Amino acid sequence: MLTDYRVRQREYLLEISRALTAQLNVDELLQMVLESATKILAGQAGLIALREPDASFTARASYGLSHALMPYFAPLLTDIPNDVDLHRFHIPALAEKLGLVAGRLGLHLQQVVALPMSIKQELIGVLYVFRAYGTRFTANDRQILASFADQAAIAVHNAQLYERISHEKRRLDAILEHSADGVMILDPTLRITVFNRALTRLSRWPAAEALGRYHDEVIHWVRLETDMDLSAAVAGGWPLPAAHPLYVEGDLRRRGGGTVSVGITYAPLFDQDDHLVNVIADVRDVTRFREADEVKSVFISVISHELKTPVALIKGYADTLMRQDACWDQETMQKSLEVIVEEADRLNQLIDNLLDASRLQAGALPLEMDEVALDVLSERVARLFRTQTERHDIVVQFPSGFPVVVGDMGRLEQVLNNLVSNALKYSPGGGTITISGVARPDEVLLTVSDPGVGIPSEEISRIFERFYRGTKERHQRTPGAGLGLYLAKAIVEAHGGRIWAESRSGEGAAFSFAIPRQSNL
Ligand code: ADP
């Protein structure tokens, strides 16, 4: 009879321990442990308390007791010795405490056994089994429960580890997914195993499409800035365990067309035996650096050219006038001095424009607002330019009673000056330049049109950019720094207005800008 019971106990134990190792959810696992422990010892109720980081114990699972009763069992969870030895483990006055608690709750619980759950000599919890009848727990009961408790401790420990690891993994996944840089992780055969959101944004490859493909199927370089790409590096023996990260920069082909400038840092990851486990690639959008580089080099070439020309002219004329051996007539003197003054003005203008552009970059273009009559202003600008050209007619067309606007007179004059000077500059064959105005209910519109060389349609969207001067063949013929329209646009926009160009190559150009009207003017 007794042997039968023992055999059944052992079988049960075995079955349970198998089930336990498969369970990774801590709460369900504790529930299972407790239920089987209670049944195995022919008890009626049970409790598992786990040790908290502050060394106190909290009931984490109960069997045969309603959950609401848990707090009442707290006295049984105090004075727990930090002792993992099964034979010495003893909670003082445990039976008395149970008597008190059971009495208060009206429960028929008479016997209690408590055993340590430990892992690597460290107490991680206590397993309690209660009996509703008077039969004491024997040494054999404790023995059975002990091996069982240890098994359970290992499983609990594993489950806790698993929980912590999966929590960490979720955290890392979230960090990767939301990283501002593109991130991809490759396996040792260079197949993509992780492809984050930022990389989808950069490359236009949906993660689902990219995952499982080889690196080279997704990363196509249209142009390389660095010596080699990943395949070339790998063919050359990268990575060795001591290898540095590999940096590749260039233009990447996007899925569905177009390119994006990126820099990719590939970092190899090795295991303890120096086997390559992963390659982690960090993909960064370098478009802005590229643009900044381009602007810088354009700036240097445009400015040096633009500064050199007037300086050379001024120096040339001044040198000539200074010659001791020559005697210049009044007219030559006058003409030469005029060139010197004109070129000095040009230099001044260029310096002003550069200062304005740098102020704009710093985010400030202060306006001094006043009432401005754009028709009067246009007349003034036209008069000034008429003295500078013989080949062009400058016509001003405004309806009478043209409304005034609120604006910065000096700045708006700068815009008009630039548009008219461009109209002259880019109409080398002469002809009629028209400055016309239209009053609309909510804005006034000014247009400067010329019969000149015009702008090819593919350039129209770029002419308002800083330092943009059109294609080389075109801009080499005329001086300029490519700042005029950039500043004009900034000024018009600071007034709450818009500026645009309409043109066709060879058919002249019309530049218009609109300034909002104040309702009371
Ligand atoms: P800049 O005249 O100093 O080059 P802008 O910023 O004033 O600089 O003009 C930018 C470019 O736009 C010019 O280089 C030229 O190619 C083009 N452009 C401007 N105005 C005209 C125009 N009226 N006709 C043809 N092209 C123009």
Image (tube, rainbow, N blue to C red):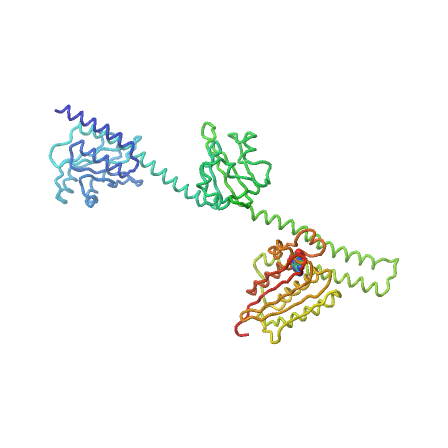
Does the image show residue 354?
no
362 relative position to 158: left or right: right
For the image, the number of numbered tags is: 0
Using the image as rendered, state which of residue 462 and residue 80 is in the foreground: 462
- Using the image, determine if residue 133 lies above or below residue 424: above
Residue lying at the far bottom of the rendered structure = 401
Q: Which quadrant of the figure contains the C terminus?
A: bottom right
Q: Position of residue 63 (x, y in %)?
A: 20, 39
Q: Position of residue 514 (x, y in %)?
A: 58, 66
Q: Residue at x 43, y 44 (%)?
A: 175
370 relative position to 304: left or right: left
Q: Residue at x 56, y 64 (%)?
A: 497
Residue lying at the far left of the rendered structure = 134
Using the image as rendered, state which of residue 62 and residue 513 is in the foreground: 513
Q: Position of residue 275 (x, y in %)?
A: 47, 28
Asked which quadrant contains residue 95, the reply is: top left
Does the image show residue 492?
yes
Q: Position of residue 78 (x, y in %)?
A: 23, 40
Q: Residue at x 16, y 39 (%)?
A: 98
- Ligand 1 quadrant? bottom right
- Using the image, determine if residue 139 lies above or below residue 220: above
Q: Which quadrant of the figure contains the N terminus?
A: top left
299 relative position to 177: left or right: right
1 relative position to 330: left or right: left
